[in-house]
Amino acid sequence: MPTVDVLIVGAGSAGLFLLGALVRKGISALLLESKALGFGQTTSSQGILHAGVKYSLGGLAGDDATEAAAAAALWSKMLSGEGTDLREVCTMADHCYLWRTAGIAGAAGMLGAKVALRTRPEPVSLAARPAWLKHVAGEVLTLAESVIDPRSLLHVLAQRHVGRIALGEVRSVTQRDGLQRIEIAGAHPVTIHARQLILTAGAGNQALSQLAGSACEMQRRPLRQAMIRGPLEMAFGHCIDGAKTRITMTSDRMPSGDVVWHIGGQVAEDGPSMSPEKFQAHVIAELRSVLPKVNLERCSFASYAVDRAEPRTVDGRRPPRAFSHTSGGVTTVWPVKLVLSPVIAAEIAASIAANEDPAVRWPREMPLPELAQRPWEAATTSWSSIA
Ligand SMILES: Cc1cc2nc3c(=O)[nH]c(=O)nc-3n(C[C@H](O)[C@H](O)[C@H](O)COP(=O)(O)OP(=O)(O)OC[C@H]3O[C@@H](n4cnc5c(N)ncnc54)[C@H](O)[C@@H]3O)c2cc1C
């Protein structure tokens, strides 16, 4: 194969935004995926285009909240067709609700949110609340955070670059004469030379960076996300308690007509240390506590484990911002948040020059990876009814 400027490995939100940014600049770039588009974090993501609330509440109302707010502004442009045109991406909600638990800690958390956010949450009158929030005792606010369907994002980004994305597995990486020589195994083995190798493989980055001789330390933060499906309303929002987001809810409609609530936040962080049965009881108790009178009749419950993959931090907490590190022609990238993927992609693209032929494509025989399923679509998910 001819030499390319960049080979990207890993087709989640980071790799796909980066491919688009490089191609727009006339850089010759190809993307390799070993499983399915967005497998791992992007298709597990809740798709919230955070405007900074969680970070502000965590006492980190500094740079990262600013970065998230700037990224949210960029998304709003892209969703209206400016820059990377994302008009075809499915927007599930154009705002989230913010509510609190009745205690003092909840009130303090809400105050933090109002003070720290650039986009001020707006109070919602009792009459204007959706039915699922009618029985909440405290104040309810709307927050200008849109929610997108991450799978439709992957589809929109990938369909523009058919021929530049292929299924395969990196077997070896060696450096010679300033080029990366990458051997690719799969249905159609091939060897490719790239001026730069960029790893956007999420949890796969650690092994790949070792293979490429550029060890970048990674941390995993385990989560257990909950899913409740049944005759429910679509619901999007965060329940705040002190400095914590007690639960974060997003929703999707299943082909059967049922709605599925996808639940993260503090409960998802509590989950990995619990048995599946204890976790189910914990989530239901939390839901009944933060949404009094919630009706879960004819609903069923399931959960799944997923890790957030990030650069290692000294204290093991979430890194403050999107990460990229380059050494010896190998760049390792963790966007840390879906919402930050286009931001880090633009930064990286700005640092690369075009030298090779931008028309280079993968050999025709190399298959295009499929889209990864969302967790509630997977046939292997086991649902149990809620008593
Ligand atoms: C439960 C959950 C909820 C989240 N909610 C939000 C949210 O609401 N808003 C937000 O902004 N962020 C959210 N995030 C964070 C966000 O999802 C991630 O930061 C982002 O999607 C990471 O994208 P990525 O492309 O780096 O990684 P991934 O999405 O993990 O993609 C990595 C890709 O690389 C591929 N790959 C792995 N190994 C190899 C290999 N050896 N060779 C080739 N390919 C490989 C994988 O198959 C995959 O396709 C959430 C994360 C989780 C886990």
Image (cartoon, rainbow, N blue to C red):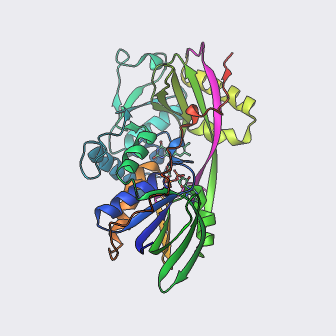
The magenta stretch is 295-322
Q: How many marks?
A: 0
Residue 72 vertical position relative to residue 320 in the rendered view, above or below: above
Identify the image quadrant of the C terminus.
top right
Question: Residue at the location (40% across, 57% down)?
Answer: 163
Write down the quadrant of residue 282 in the picture.
Answer: top right
Q: Position of residue 210 (x, y in %)?
A: 63, 71
Write down the quadrant of residue 341 in the picture.
Answer: bottom left
Identify the image quadrant of the N terminus.
bottom left
Residue 122 vertical position relative to residue 129 in the rendered view, above or below: below
Q: Is residue 157 magenta?
A: no
Foreground residue, 23 or 75? Answer: 23
Write down the quadrant of residue 343 in the picture.
Answer: bottom left
Q: Position of residue 60 (x, y in %)?
A: 47, 52
Is residue 164 at least partly visible in the picture? yes
Foreground residue, 75 or 214? Answer: 214
